[in-house]
Image: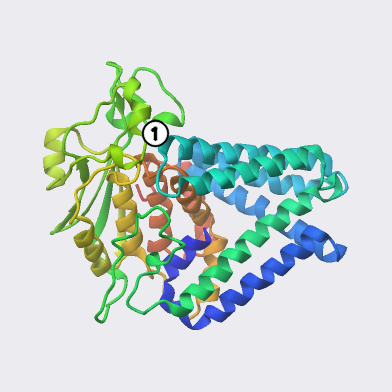
Amino acid sequence: MLKLAFLLIGPASFRGHWHGIAALGVGLMVLAALVVTDVVPAISAITYHALGLAFAVYGALALAAAAVARRGALACLAPAASMLAGLAVLLAPIESDLALGLFYAVLLLVDGVGRIVPAMVGRYVGWRIHVAVAVGEFVLALLLIAGWPIPRTHAVHFCVGVFIGGAGWLLLRLGVMLRTLEEEVAILMLPLFAGRGWYEHAPILVEDDAGARRQAEPILVRVWTPRGCANITDRLPILDRYIGAVDRDGSISTGHSSMEVAPDVYISHYPRQEMTRSSNHFLHALRGSKENDAPGLFQPSYAAEVAQWVEADREVRFHTYNARRLRAFWIGYRQDSTYNVVNRNCSTVIAGALDAALEGVLATDRPWQRLLALLVNPDMWLAGLMRLRADSATWTPGFLLDYAVPLARIVDRPDLSWHHRFTWFLARFRRPEETGAD
C-alpha cells in the first residue's frame, strides 16, 4: 500500500522530502527494535494498542468498502483478517499472548501458503524471494506456536515489531532512491517496483510534461471475467473469479482484459495461437519460465474482439490520468509481442499501463497530508491488497478488476470528505445497482 501511495502522489512531490522519508524509515526501525525488545514497556504498550486500533478500524472500513461494492470473497477475507487481528490485540490483555500468538501464527501460515504456492507453480522472475519470505513466515509461525526462543509473553510484540520494521526498511530504501532519481525517470523504474519486470517500459520523459489532469476521453478498462464469459455449470468460489472457470466441455476460461483511450490507443495482448485450456495442461501453462513464451498479437479494437468472442462483462473508467505517460508506456511495450501466461499476459500489460498513466495523479505541494489521507482510505487497502496478491502470483482479470474499481474512486475523487464517503456507502448499500465506478 505504501508503494501505491507514493506512486499516485509521484516522485516530484516527495523529491525534496527524501530525507524526511528516510528519517521516518529509520525512526520506525528504531521503534520496531524497542517494541521487539520491550526495553521501554510504555512505548511497547502504546505502539501495540495503536497498531491494533489501526488494524481494527482500517480492516472494518476496507471490509465495508468491499462488501457494499460487492467485491469478490478474496477482497473480503484479508480486511476481515485485519479487523480480527486488531480486535484481538485490543480486547485481549498483553499478558495473554498464548492465544494471540496462535492467532498470528495462523495468519502467518495462511499468508505463507498464499505466497509459496503460486511462486512454486509459476517459477516467474524473483520467485525464490517469495519462497524465502514464505519460509520465513512458516518459521516465525512455528516459533510463535512453540514459544521458543521467543517467549510467549513477547511473541505478539515480536510480530508487531517485525511489521513496523518492514515498513521502516521500505521507507528508508525509498527515501534514498528518490534522492538520486532523475526528474524525467518514472518512479516505476526504481528497484522497489521492478522486481517482476512489468515496468521495464515505464516512460522516461525528456521534455516538459503537462502532468496528470482530467481528460476529455476517459481510460476504459474492460474485463472479461472468467465466470462472466464462460459457459459454466458449477461455481468455484474465488477460483472462478481470480483464476479460471471450467466450461461445460471441460476447458478452462481465464478471462481477458483490455484498455482503450479514444481515438488512438487500444491495448489488448493475446496469444497468436489459442492456448490449450484443458485441465491436464493448465498447471503446466502456469509456469512463467521462458519455455512457455509464445508469439502474441495485439488486438486492433474492441469491436474486433467482440466480433470474435463476446462483449466484456465489466468496465471501469478513469477520467484523471497522464495521457502522455500512458502512450509512452504503450509505445515501448508493443515493440515486443511475446506472450507469457504468467509474466506477460493481457492483465499484466493493463496493470502496467494503468500504473504508468496514474503516476503523480495526486501530486500536491503538501505530500505528507496527502499521504496520510491515502493511508486512511479503505479503497487504498483494497487496491494495495490486489497489488500484493498479484505480485506474489500474477495479474489476472479478476485481480485487475478488483484493483481498478477502488483505484478509480481514489484518483477521480481524491478530496471526498468522510461525511460524503459515508453517504456514498449508504447509497451504495441501498441502491447497489445504480452507483459505483463499474
Residue 191 position (above or below residue 300): below
Residue 48: x and y in percent read 77, 57
Q: Is residue 431 above or below residue 27?
A: above
Residue 362: x %, y % from top left: 41, 70
Mark 1 burial class by Cα count in 10 Å: few <14, some 14-19, many 20+: many
Q: Nearer the viewer, residue 357 or 421?
A: 357
Figure disc tally: 1
Q: Is residue 136 left or right of residue 122?
A: right
Question: Which image quadrant is residue 40 in?
Answer: bottom right
Picture colour scheme: rainbow
Tell me if 128 is positioned left or right of 265 in this view: right
Q: Is 260 left or right of 365, judged from the image as shown?
A: left
Q: Answer left or right for 84 relative to 339.
A: right
Q: Name the residue type under label 1.
A: Ile
The quadrant holding residue 285 is top left
Question: In this figure, which residue is indicated by the disc labeled 1?
Answer: 243
Q: How far from the left and from the top, in percent, is residue 378?
A: 53, 54
Q: Hey, which residue is sitting farthest front in the picture?
A: 291
Q: Position of residue 226 (x, y in %)?
A: 33, 32
| Residue 372 shows up from this direction | no
The residue located at (15%, 39%) in the rendering is 305
Above or below, comparing residue 144 to residue 58 in the picture: above
Q: Secondary structure at mark 1?
A: loop
Residue 185 visible in image: yes
Write down the quadrant of residue 343 in the picture: top left
Q: Residue at x 41, y 38 (%)?
A: 122
